[in-house]
Image: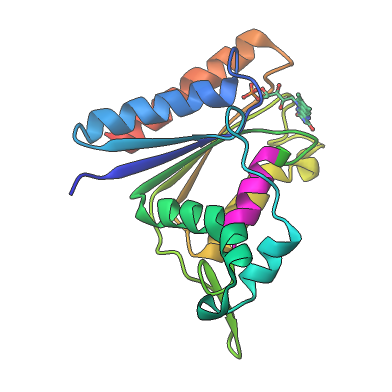
Amino acid sequence: MSKTLLRIDASARTMGSVSRTLADAVQHAWQTANPDGRVVLRDLAAQPVPHISPDTITGYYTPTDQLTPALRAATALSDELIAELLAAHTLLISTPMYNFSIPSALKAYIDQIVRLNHTFAADENGLRGLVADRPTFIASAAGAVYTGTNIAGLNFEGPYLTTLLGFLGIASVELLSVEGTTVDPQAMEATLQQTRERIHALLH
Ligand SMILES: Cc1cc2nc3c(=O)[nH]c(=O)nc-3n(C[C@H](O)[C@H](O)[C@H](O)COP(=O)(O)O)c2cc1C
């Protein structure tokens, strides 16, 4: 069976989005390495995933055989998104930094896929991820520069995403960040080029 790349885009911008440009480079390299591969795209800006509702939450904590039609309907999107995630051989999440973290569009998606007894377990042994590890790329863009600067501690984006993925069981995460997108266009272009080279090395 051919491999699947699940690409999730989160920038509100389509034109001029650095995180989407980076994701294009990852997708291109992945498709070159997997010519028979299939790309599934979730564009969270074009088609936003709704926030969970009270019925979604009740549905999350109700055993499957006891779900009412209303609770089934409220958890149907979560079922679909989790099935899509579990079927993917490789994950690619592209995201800007908004207010030191991820955009709410991506958080709404996360709230649909992090689900007890589906993607994580909680029992007497504590918390355990239920998602099998798989190659995962995070393509992120931030306006300022955090790495090696005195504002490094304000970056909750990459650390949050890698922690969350690790919680679900996904440890094979490559964090590809372009920082300083609003600071110096030339420096940003140089970083983008370096990151493209890293993508090429990782996927060939
Ligand atoms: C609503 C909003 C909030 C932002 N917050 C931050 C921030 O907290 N820190 C930062 O370094 N850049 C911030 N930026 C700048 C973006 O991270 C930067 O423009 C990045 O390139 C956006 O990703 P994109 O190019 O894929 O759209 C913000 C931009 C927007 C629109």
Residue 158 occupies which quadrant of the picture? top right
Q: Residue at x 62, y 14 (%)?
A: 187
What's the residue at 67%, 51% (across, down)? 160
Given the current orientation, which residue lies at the most extreme bottom position? 124
50 in relation to 132, above or below: above
Name the magenta segment's main secondary structure.
helix
Q: Which residue occupies 20% across, 44% down?
A: 2
Viewer-proximal residue, 139 or 55?
Answer: 55
Q: Is 106 rendered above or below residue 78?
A: above
- Residue 150 in the image: state x and y as whole percent: 82, 37
> Where does the image place residue 134, in percent across and percent down from the top left?
38, 55
Q: Above or below — where is 120 with respect to 17? A: below
Q: Nearer the viewer, residue 103 or 45?
A: 45
| Residue 98 part of the magenta-drawn span | no
- Does the magenta-highlighted stretch encompass residue 109? yes
**Quadrant in which residue 30 is drawn:** top left
Residue 164 pos. (x, y %): 61, 57
The residue under the point 26% across, 45% down is 3
Residue 183 visible here? yes
Residue 102 appears anywhere in the view: no
Residue that extends furthest to the front in the rendered view of this protein: 69
Compared to residue 147, the image places residue 79 above or below, namely: below
Position of the C terminus by quadrant? top left
Stretch in magenta = 105-114
Query: Quarter containing ligand 1?
Result: top right
